Amino acid sequence: MEGSRVAKKEGGSKLPWIIAGSVAGVLAAAYLGLCAFAMNRNAVLPNVSVSGIDVSNMTVEQAENTVRASVDQRAGDIKLTLVYEDLEESLEASQMMFPGGNGVQAFSLGRGRFLDSGWQLASHALGRSSRIPLDLDENDPALKDLMERMERTVEEATEDHGYQVEGDRLVMTKGAPVVTVDWNAVKDNALSALQEAFEEAGSGPVEKRVLLSASQSQAEEPDFDAIHRAVYTEARDAALDLEAMEITDHVVGVDFDVEALRTAYRNAKSGETFSIPLTVTQPKVTKDDLGGSLFRDVLGEATSSVSGSGARKSNVKLAAEACNDVILLPGEEFSYNGATGPRTAAKGYQAAPAYYNGATVQEIGGGVCQPSSTLYYAVLHTTLEITERHNHRYAVGYVPDGMDATVSYNSLDFKFKNNTDYPIKIVTSSYDAGGGRKLNVKIYGTNVDGVRVEPTNGVFNVVAPTVQYVPDANVARGSLVLDREQNAYRGRSAQTYRTVYAADGTQIERQDLGVSVYKMRPTVYHYNPADGDPATWPGGQPPAPGATPDPGTTPPPTDPGPSTDPGTAPDPGTEVDPPPASDPEPEPEPAPPPSDSGLNPLPNPSAA
């Protein structure tokens, strides 16, 4: 129709917007999924390195181990040198300790915020890289030592300090230039140089040189803390270097009040010379003191007679040599088992008589308790602290009762501690004299006060050996055979004391070292069982062959008499270390139990 108008429809098509929204939703969901995957992924991002060490796609543990191994390998090629004019001090990176933790740092990269994690993972997968610095400890002992060495070197080489130490005072002139170095900046530069060195290392040696610059204060106030660091010295005693066997020098301590110096400086006029007091601390032990007194005195000495077979004498000598020239610093503890180690045939020890469950047997190392007992007897003549000691099952003959020390590896030990202020040294010697073998032990040290120590003992509760009959079909009828391997010993107890006397003879202390209890071992005879128990023999005589013993009476047997003195074990050694098959030294019958004040000094151990 002419002139008619067609009405326009309202609202265009919404499909493009729906499609766009759907795509955006899918992309958002995909990204959120990527973020979730990135956060839960158990690996470091791609293209991540720690100071040049690739840790891409590794677990925390793998990254940590990789960095640690690479650092250990590269450290041997890295050298850090601090330089001031013509002065140098260096550090090998292998001397440093690295705290670790870079594996955790690398793993944490890209996991800070959830919505960022997906982008971090995608960008690193497409080529983006991240470099994490090596975790270095600014308080590392080796780095700290380098800084201190360089500071001392610079201080000693600088002629015009603007101050000087004169006796017990610090003298300073206000306005005079004082050379100072910003050591905090030096440390920061050193750490940065180490970072660069680890990134560059891997193909050969790398040296980083850090140049130091100094400033001279004139109008401005000097760095009083730097002056304190330069002057302060900690007192140090002279000491014995066991590796070099040399005496290190002592150091006199020097200190001052920093605030007192600052106040005095501000109160002084320009160009005025002033001073403040120094705190000077003298060491307790100087080099002259230690050099002149080191091992100068015999603190204790003992000698014992060595008997038995050649194998036993060899064992005694071998164990004594293991203790020879052992040095103990103040506070250190001596262990006999630690000094000798296991007594094995590979070390040269031989089979010799020993105790096993109270019986005498042949055992590798038999006799090694004589050196421990002789050493213990020497220690009893000193004030050294006894920390572990055990007496033998049977009393010995080479040291007095209560003065022995049995040992058994991984079981019983003899230990004592150096409780003096000076080192001590054990010196042993084995020699022949007077037709017999002797073992001598000396303990050298420093007897500052001139004290004298005297061990004493008392024997009581003596038990005479009984007689024991053992049937043995190999024994001829009508006879008794003495068991010469199982020697009879009297049982007894011994109370031991150690008395300390001053140089003028005044008693200082009497130490109760306890009671040693020694068992009795019977005299053993073997008889033919066909003869009946010897305890039933009429008149102590065996019955005639074929006769039946009279069961009616049991008269006491005739004592055949042992062939050895039953009083003392000639050499019990250890609990697996018995007397040799030789007669012991005869000894007098022990006295009744002594009173606490009636003990007599012990005899010379060489006569025991």
Image: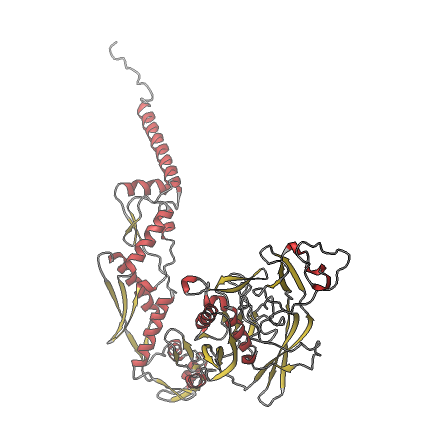
Q: How many marks?
A: 0
* 180 horizontally vs 607: left or right: left
> Which of the pair 334/408 is nearer the observer?
408
> Which of the pair 391/41 is nearer the observer?
391
Indicate the quadrant containing the C terminus: top left, top right, bottom left or bottom right. bottom right
Is any part of residue 108 visible from this angle? no
Question: Which residue is situated farthest in the left direction here?
Answer: 203
What residue lies at 32% left-to-right and 62% top-to-bottom? Answer: 94
Indicate the quadrant containing the N terminus: top left, top right, bottom left or bottom right. top left
Question: Which residue is situated farthest in the bottom direction here?
Answer: 504
Question: Which residue is situated farthest in the right direction here?
Answer: 552
Look at the picture and state if 172 lies above or below 572.
below
Look at the picture and state if 597 lies above or below 345.
below
Question: Which residue is situated farthest in the top direction here?
Answer: 1
What residue lies at 66% left-to-right and 81% top-to-bottom? Answer: 599
Quarter occupied by residue 490: bottom right
Look at the picture and state if 106 lies above or below 504.
above
Q: Position of residue 441 (x, y in %)?
A: 49, 77
* Snapshot colouring: secondary structure
What residue lies at 59% left-to-right and 86% top-to-bottom? Answer: 502
Quarter occupied by residue 411: bottom right
Look at the picture and state if 23 lies above or below 449.
above
> Which of the pair 332/372 is nearer the observer?
372
Is any part of residue 561 visible from this angle? yes
Q: Position of residue 342 (x, y in %)?
A: 46, 63
Q: Position of residue 452 (x, y in %)?
A: 57, 84
Q: Position of residue 364 (x, y in %)?
A: 47, 62
> Which of the pair 57/127 is nearer the observer?
57
